[in-house]
Amino acid sequence: EVQLVQSGAEVKKPGESLKISCKGSGYSFTNNWMAWVRQMPGKGLEWMGIIYPGDSDTRYSPSFQGQVTISADKSINTAYLQWSSLKASDTAMYYCARSPRGYGEFDYWGQGTLVTVSS
Amino acid sequence: QSALTQPRSVSGSPGQSVTISCTGTSSDVGGYNYVSWYQQHPGKVPKLMIDDVSRRPSGVPDRFSGSKSGNTASLTISGLQAEDEADYYCCSYAGSNTFVVFGGGTKLTVL
């Protein structure tokens, strides 16, 4: 059974750093793309970026380039999304989602990680 | 402003059909046959309903169908049921630079 299990909710202050995770199981982690999707409170889905764990090929949405870093550790089947300096506007639910071919077909999703940034 | 344009809301009565449109450009929807649709109930994780414009993943009812004409993709839900009330998002591949774009989402209300 394919599962994506994300790390738990986070409460941070502006300017702090953060790294959230997404562990895949039940499939070949290295041979599937993994994306990160943001959903701000009451808003729609926004594609942030995607990584191919097999060779660490990483692409970013222009809206998120330079704002976040996506990485993966294929030895532990885990993808990451990190911020070096959080802003209040980063408050959102963040989902990881598997894409077997990298064409936007996200067939399995993590349960989401709620990140709250507040002073 | 989202890259793909969807109506903010649509509605229909049980048993009726509704169609949700998703308009992009020749660089995304019109350029590739890689349009997908996602259903999201309040507080829940998005679910893939259609990929490759018109392919239904296993387990998705055949009441859901997808199509594309030019730069506009469409999701049609026939025989509306109360449980179909949700937000729907389209998504398209947009080439190796932009990669993926989402629509702004459409709220479906079953009257």
Image (spheres, coloured by chain):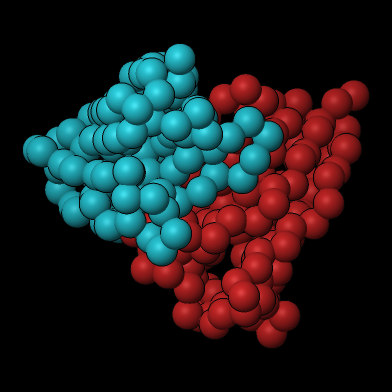
Chain colours: A red, B cyan
Q: Position of residue B47 (x, y in %)?
A: 51, 48
Q: Nearer the viewer, residue B52 or B10?
A: B10
Q: Position of residue A24 (x, y in %)?
A: 65, 71
Q: Nearer the viewer, residue B49 or B89?
A: B49
Tell me if I can see residue A108 in this picture: yes
Residue at image point 74% right, 58% down? A6
Looking at the rendered structure, the number of numbered marks drawn on it comes to 0
Residue at image point 48% right, 73% down? A32
Q: Can you say which quadrant of the picture contains the N terminus of chain B?
A: top left
Which image quarter: residue B6?
top left
Residue at image point 65% right, 68% down? A3
Q: Nearer the viewer, residue B64 or A82?
A: B64
Rendered position, B65 above or below A74: above
Horizontal side, residue B74 vs residue A102: left or right:
left
Rendered position, B91 above or below A106: above
Q: Residue furthest left?
A: B70
Q: Position of residue A117 (x, y in %)?
A: 81, 31
Which image quarter: residue A87?
top right
